[in-house]
């Protein structure tokens, strides 16, 4: 098993190490999936079909983007 390391910035950002980008064949704009199991997290590339489904779903939820809705759901 190969390990790769990166640091978290004060803005909670990190650079995906080259070895990880190569292993997942990542390109700019690719979406990532984090699978969380307790204190272990696995990272994978979001499949194109999944990304297309999420974009279509997001477009259908625009009626919930009003300031009134934001105020009503802010504390949930």
Image (cartoon, grey):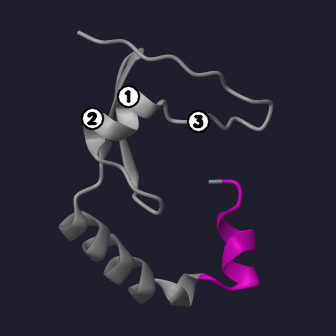
Tell me the residue that label 3 is attached to.
15
Q: Residue furthest right?
A: 10
Asked if the residue under mark 1 is in contact with the one under mark 2, i.e. CB atoms within 8 Å, the reply is yes
The quarter of the picture where residue 33 lies is top left
Q: CA distance from mark 2 to mark 1?
A: 6 Å
Q: Is 29 positioned to the left or the right of 57 in the image?
A: right
The quarter of the picture where residue 20 lies is top left
25, above or below 39, in the image: below
Tell me the residue that label 1 is attached to.
19
Tell me the residue that label 2 is attached to.
23
Q: Position of residue 17 (x, y in %)?
A: 48, 30
The quarter of the picture where residue 48 lies is bottom left
- Dot 1 falls on a residue whose secondary structure is helix
Q: CA distance from mark 3 to mark 2?
A: 15 Å
Q: CA distance from mark 3 to mark 1?
A: 11 Å
Q: Position of residue 55 (x, y in %)?
A: 37, 77
Q: Which label's residue is closer to the chain start, 3 or 2?
A: 3
Residue 66, label in figure: none
Q: Is 45 positioned to the left or the right of 61 in the image?
A: left
Q: Residue at the spot x=28%, y=41% of the render?
A: 24
Q: Nearer the viewer, residue 2 or 55?
A: 2
């Amino acid at each position: 098993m190969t390990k790769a390391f990166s640091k978290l910035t004060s803005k909670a950002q990190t650079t995906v190490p080259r070895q990880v980008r190569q292993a997942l064949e990542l390109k700019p704009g690719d979406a990532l999936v984090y699978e969380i199991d307790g204190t272990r997290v696995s990272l994978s590339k979001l499949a194109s079909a999944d990304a297309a489904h999420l974009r279509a779903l997001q477009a259908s939820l625009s009626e919930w983007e009003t300031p009134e809705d934001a105020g009503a759901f802010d504390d949930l």
